[in-house]
Structure formats: C-alpha cells, structure tokens
C-alpha cells in the first residue's frame, strides 16, 4: 500500500510537470503568433498619426521593449489573470471572457448531451446489428464525427438549422 501511494504521487508529480511544460510551450506559441499576426499599432493609430504618435503608442503597450521582456510581461500578466485590452472592442479581455463564459458552458453541455443522445443509440444499434447496413451506417457516422473539423461541422449545422430549416438564428445567443 505504501509503495503504491509513492508510485501514484510520483505519477501525479510527473503529470503536473508535463502540464506545466505544455502550458509554457502553449504560452510561447500564443505569444509568437500574436507577434507574427501583425503590428497592432497600425490598427490602433489613426491614418494621420505621426512617427512620434506611433512610438508613444508602442511605448504605452510595451512593444518598444525587447521580445524576451515582452514575453515575461505577457506571461506574468497572464498568470495574474490580466489578459490585456481588446484592440477591436477596447475592453478588458478578461471581462469579455467572463461575459461569454455562461454561453460557452451552455454550448458545451448541450453539445455533450446531444452527442450522447445520438452516439449511444447508434453505437448500441450498430453493436446489435453487426455487419448489416445499420452497422455500416453507424461506422460511417462515427468516422465522420471523429474526422470532421468542429468548425466545419458548426458551419454545416448553422447552414442546415438556420437557413434550410429556419429553426434558429444565424448568430447570437
């Protein structure tokens, strides 16, 4: 029993270290992609902005600092829950995240319930009717569900349920 708890604690510590490394790598990727996506100052500054105005905006955003310093600021701010300001909406990104979180939870739970309501009966039916047309249909549905990108499936659902059978609006909650 004591030996098993030591193994499980070691396992948990290893997994936690892997998770931290994964989060660190993801933060580097997000930071790099944000820098590669273009200069946010060009979006924020008016067309008639002078070079001094652009330099002032860069300084206020910390974009005049070396990349390692910018990454450190990005990382420490993120760990404190400060995700910055949205350039498009000029609001706190955390505010927007919190505001949209309930809709995300509703969407997640709804999709999970609908998935289970479809997948379980199709799976059971396929298992009972092995090597029949029903089984092949179940396998095709499962393969399509696993291989189709979720954004594409979402677009198809919007097309079907909002345009062809207008049950839902095309956007909004």
Image (cartoon, rainbow, N blue to C red):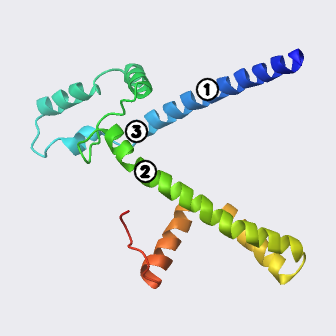
Measuring from the top left, give residue 113's x and y in whole percent: 61, 62
Q: Is residue 102 left or right of residue 148?
A: left
At horizontal 77% and vertical 78% (from top left) the residue drawn is 137
- Which residue is identified by label 2? 102
Q: Is mark 1 on a helix, strand or loop?
A: helix
- Which residue is identified by label 3? 34
Does residue 21 lie above or below 88 as drawn?
above
Q: Which mark is first along the chain, 2 or 3?
A: 3
Q: What element carries label 2?
A: helix
- Which residue is identified by label 1? 21
Does residue 115 lie above or below 23 as drawn?
below
At horizontal 81% and vertical 77% (from top left) the residue drawn is 136
Q: Which mark is first along the chain, 1 or 2?
A: 1
Please rate how many residues cluster around mark 1, counting C-alpha atoms within 10 Å: few if below 14, some from 14 to 19, many from 20.
few
Query: Closest to the observer: 6 or 79?
Result: 6
Which is more foreground, mark 3 or mark 2? 2
Please rate how many residues cluster around mark 3, counting C-alpha atoms within 10 Å: few if below 14, some from 14 to 19, many from 20.
few
Please rate how many residues cluster around mark 2, counting C-alpha atoms within 10 Å: few if below 14, some from 14 to 19, many from 20.
few
Marks 3 and 2 in Cβ contact (< 8 Å): no
Q: Quadrant of the C terminus?
A: bottom left
Can you tell which mark lies on residue 41? none
Q: Is mark 3 on a helix, strand or loop?
A: helix
Q: Can residue 66 be seen in this view?
A: yes
At horizontal 17% and vertical 33% (from top left) the residue drawn is 54
Whole-angstrom CA distance, mark 2 to mark 1, is 29 Å
Query: Closest to the observer: 160 or 102?
Result: 102
Q: Which mark is first along the chain, 3 or 1?
A: 1
């Amino acid at each position: 029993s004591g030996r098993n708890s030591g193994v499980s604690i070691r396992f948990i510590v290893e997994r936690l270290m892997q998770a931290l490394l994964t989060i660190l790598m993801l933060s580097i990727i997000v930071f790099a992609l944000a820098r590669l996506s273009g200069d946010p100052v060009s979006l924020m500054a008016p067309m008639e902005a002078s070079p001094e105005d652009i330099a002032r905006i860069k300084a206020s955003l910390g974009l005049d600092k070396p990349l390692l310093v910018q990454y450190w600021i990005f990382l420490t701010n993120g760990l404190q829950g400060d995700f910055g300001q949205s350039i498009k909406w000029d609001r706190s990104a955390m505010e927007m995240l919190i505001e949209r979180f309930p809709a995300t939870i509703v969407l997640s739970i709804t999709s999970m319930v609908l998935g289970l309501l479809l997948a379980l009966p199709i799976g059971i039916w396929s298992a009972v009717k092995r090597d029949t047309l029903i089984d092949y249909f179940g396998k095709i549905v499962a393969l399509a569900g696993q291989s189709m990108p979720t954004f594409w499936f979402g677009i198809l659902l919007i097309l079907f349920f909002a345009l062809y059978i207008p049950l839902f609006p095309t956007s909004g909650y």
